[in-house]
């Protein structure tokens, strides 16, 4: 290595030492920051007009610029009062694992590249398969997120259940609460929109199994091939869990593949209080599960699990001549055989580091805490005038809306609730987005961050009440 590169590396080391302490301070004081900071227009204009330099710039100048203009102007999904979408619960332990894994730049495609990281991922996959109640033949692989996990599982389902000639007649069943990544994945692997049957959800926003049974019977009469049902274990909108046991029985009867999208809800398997709601998940053929949602991980750390690992091998195994020397043994199964990626980072190591440090009892407490905070929010809203609960608290998600007049048209109620959510979010104190349930515009809170306190919940509800009063006064 030349002298100039060594000198620059020393500079980088000094900057990163300072950055570590800066990051520690940032996380320790996170609740004092606005959830959604305002980005000055001049910063965006500066970035817009910047060019890629031919000679390069001083590393310290670039470092400071990145901190001030880029990293300081992003929504803080890990903030304890970020209640939109499925907020990040990332911890500094996961960040530590990220830094360490990235520093060693691990290529986690096979055992030869890193026997110890390979074993860590294998052990974690087995641990999660055991939690899901899967048999010894089960397996899986870490991927970037729930979308790719769903895509990977659906590819395995297609290849396991359909001949090439049957694909055009195949039908997949989802509910009106199924995550959009499922439909996207199905389109990517060759299905058309007409092959995706969207079923209604019941009053608890769970897949209507009666409607599912009827749809399957009708499709069979029309010469179609029902081949897969996508069940949700914790929907994004309401945290609802589809009737997994009933769905699995129907899938068994008609030899359909059952995939469970458990992006954030599968983590409830770690809670003695919550896992009963996931009864039947052990009968599924595949499961997607995001550690970067409820298991304290930074993006992206997700898993796809299958009841029989051979289904992944059947879809993704590849042994070209240039990888022969990297195979651990003749006919070995490597991670590149279990998913679409060849080059892949060691996503499992930060989760391993986290679990080894805090243990499963702490995770169970975190999951129970997230559920309790949503229940508190529901209780506080229920006690106030002009508010209506739309979906009860479940798996840390609750939906409600302001209804000051029962005769007010839905269009006006939608505008009012949208304005209330926007005003709160723009204030920087907390972030709440709206969603739509059964044609109603509602405010949605997801309270799974372990740093969210009862005071955070109470103060947020009080601010919503104040905003409501101000809006109605005008």
Image: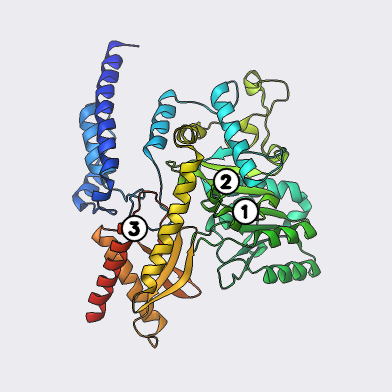
Looking at the picture, how far across and down is residue 400, in whole percent? 41, 71
Which SS class for mark 3?
Answer: helix
Residue at the spot x=59%, y=20% of the render?
A: 112
Looking at the picture, how far across and down is residue 429, in whole percent? 26, 58
- 131 and 81: which is toward the camera: 131
Name the quadrant containing residue 385. bottom left
Residue 75 visible in the snapshot = yes
Q: Nearer the viewer, mark 3 or mark 1?
A: 3
**10 Å neighbourhood of mark 1: few (<14), some, or many (≥20)?**
many
Mark number for residue 111?
none
State which tag comes first along the sequence, 3 or 2.
2
Which SS class for mark 2?
Answer: helix
Residue at the spot x=37%, y=58% of the render?
A: 83
State which tag comes first along the sequence, 1 or 2.
2
Q: Is residue 415 left or right of residue 469?
A: right
State which tag comes first along the sequence, 3 or 1.
1
Residue at the spot x=65%, y=50% of the render?
A: 154
Q: Which residue is mark 2?
A: 149
Residue at the spot x=33%, y=55% of the render?
A: 81
CA gap between label 3 and label 2 equals: 34 Å
Looking at the picture, how far across and down is residue 127, in whole percent? 60, 38
Residue 55 visible in the snapshot = no
Q: Which residue is mark 3?
A: 454
Q: Which residue is mark 1?
A: 260
CA gap between label 1 and label 2 equals: 11 Å
Name the quadrant containing residue 171. bottom right
């Amino acid at each position: 290595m030349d002298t100039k590169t060594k000198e620059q590396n020393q500079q980088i080391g000094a900057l990163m030492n300072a950055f570590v302490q800066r990051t520690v301070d940032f996380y320790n004081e996170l609740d004092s920051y606005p959830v959604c900071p305002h980005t000055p227009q001049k910063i965006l204009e500066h970035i817009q007009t910047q060019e890629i330099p031919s000679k390069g710039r001083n590393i310290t100048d670039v470092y400071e610029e990145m901190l001030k203009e880029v990293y300081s102007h992003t929504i803080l999904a890990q903030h304890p009062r970020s209640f939109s979408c499925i907020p990040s619960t990332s911890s500094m332990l996961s960040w530590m694992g990220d830094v360490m894994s990235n520093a060693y730049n691990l290529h986690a495609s096979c055992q030869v590249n890193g026997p110890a990281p390979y074993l860590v991922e294998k052990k974690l996959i087995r641990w999660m398969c055991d939690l899901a109640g899967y048999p010894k033949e089960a397996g899986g692989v870490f991927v970037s997120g729930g979308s790719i996990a769903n895509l990977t599982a659906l590819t395995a389902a297609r290849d396991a259940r359909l001949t090439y000639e049957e694909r055009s007649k195949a039908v997949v069943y989802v509910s009106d609460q199924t995550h959009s990544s499922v439909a996207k994945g199905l389109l990517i692997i060759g299905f058309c929109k007409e092959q995706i049957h969207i079923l209604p959800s019941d009053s608890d926003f769970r897949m209507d199994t009666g409607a599912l049974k009827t749809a399957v019977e009708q499709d069979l009469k029309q010469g179609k091939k029902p081949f897969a049902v996508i069940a949700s274990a914790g929907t994004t909108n309401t945290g609802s869990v589809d009737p997994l046991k009933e769905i699995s029985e129907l899938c068994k009867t008609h030899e359909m593949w059952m995939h469970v999208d458990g992006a954030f809800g599968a983590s409830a398997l770690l809670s003695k209080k919550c896992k009963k709601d996931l009864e039947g998940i052990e009968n599924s053929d595949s499961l997607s599960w995001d550690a970067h949602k409820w298991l304290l991980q930074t993006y992206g750390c997700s898993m796809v699990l299958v009841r029989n690992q051979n289904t992944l091998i059947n879809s993704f195994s590849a042994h070209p001549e240039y990888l022969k020397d990297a195979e651990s043994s003749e006919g070995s199964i490597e991670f590149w055989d279990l998913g679409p990626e060849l080059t892949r980072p060691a996503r499992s190591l930060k989760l391993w580091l986290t679990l080894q440090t805090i243990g499963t009892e702490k995770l169970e407490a975190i999951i129970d805490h997230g559920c309790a905070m949503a229940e508190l929010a529901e209780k506080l809203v229920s006690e106030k005038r002009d508010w209506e609960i739309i979906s009860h608290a479940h798996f840390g998600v609750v939906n409600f809306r302001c209804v000051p007049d029962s005769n007010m048209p839905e269009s006006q109620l939608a505008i009012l609730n949208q304005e209330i959510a926007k005003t709160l979010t723009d204030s920087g104190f907390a972030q709440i987005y709206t969603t739509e349930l059964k044609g109603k515009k509602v405010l949605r809170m997801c309270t799974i961050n372990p740093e969210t306190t009862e005071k955070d919940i109470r103060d947020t509800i009080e601010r919503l009440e104040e905003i409501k009063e101000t809006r109605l006064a005008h």
